Amino acid sequence: MSVNVAENVANIKMRVRQACERSGRAIDDVRIIAVTKYVSVATAKQAVEAGIADIGENRIEGALEKAAAIGQARLHFVGSLQSRKVKNIVNVVSCIHSLDRLSLAKEIDKRLEPGKTIDCFVQVNVSGEQSKNGLSPDEVRPFINELAAYPAVRVIGLMTMAPFEQDAERTRPIFSKLRELRDQIKADKLSSAPCTELSMGMSNDFEVAIEEGATFIRLGTSLVGKEES
């Protein structure tokens, strides 16, 4: 079944606006990332044409393919990133959402073009699920302090993935805890880690995430659908 991407974008933007109104936020505070892992370049371009300015990819190959086609949109790497593959992607994307270890930061710092910095989110496993990557909340502040040794890495915020819940309201404590942690780090006023952003919320729970302070939401199937391979 074909997906009407423009219609989906309009619907999502309406829901984002309503969530912002409920929580007293401006709609411009929230950026929508269209996660295009399961769709073609053509579908990704439809999202851009419909007004989406941020595209997210989970895989190196997909990111490289989309980068050549999406033009003015910002490209985010939102999947787990192996250190040995950093060289393939670090000078292509605008932002990495899955920084979770010093070896990865070291490789990013080494491979980024001289004189440049790259925006990164530190991935936090707030729920403690074994299946999810990321630091425990207690590890985050010491980790961010150590990142100062890698000047190419600029920590603009924290990222988490909440457990999938049929009732999205049950994800609220996860998002609330990440916001509190972000606020603590932001208060440290580190030049290498302004930490003003929150990357949290997916297709099933993004409205709750917005109510709890999300500034980037990562939407796949609800926005661009899923195509047969």
Image (spheres, helix red, strand yellow):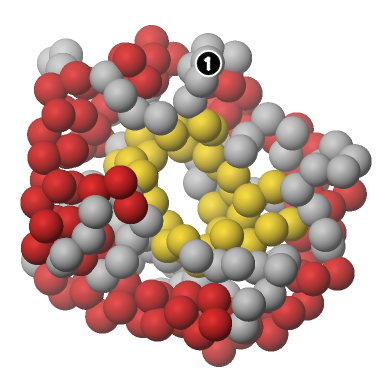
* Residue 122 appears in view: no
Residue linked to disc 1: 71
User: Which residue corresponds to the image point at 75% horizontal and 43% vertical from the top-left?
Assistant: 86
Instruction: Note whether 50 is above or below 53 in the view shown.
Output: above
Figure disc tally: 1
Q: Is residue 30 visible?
A: yes
Residue 191 or residue 117, whichever sits in front:
191
Q: Is residue 161 left or right of residue 191?
A: left
Where is residue 92 shown, x and y percent of the image?
68, 30
Q: Nearer the viewer, residue 196 or 61?
A: 196
Q: Horizontal and vertical percent for residue 135?
A: 57, 75
Image x and y of residue 27, in percent: 24, 48
Could you tell me which residue is drawn at 36 percent across and 20 percent down?
Answer: 48
Quarter in which the N terminus is drawn: top left
Task: Depth check: give the residue in front, 53 or 61.
Answer: 53
The residue lying at 48 percent from left, 25 percent from top is 73
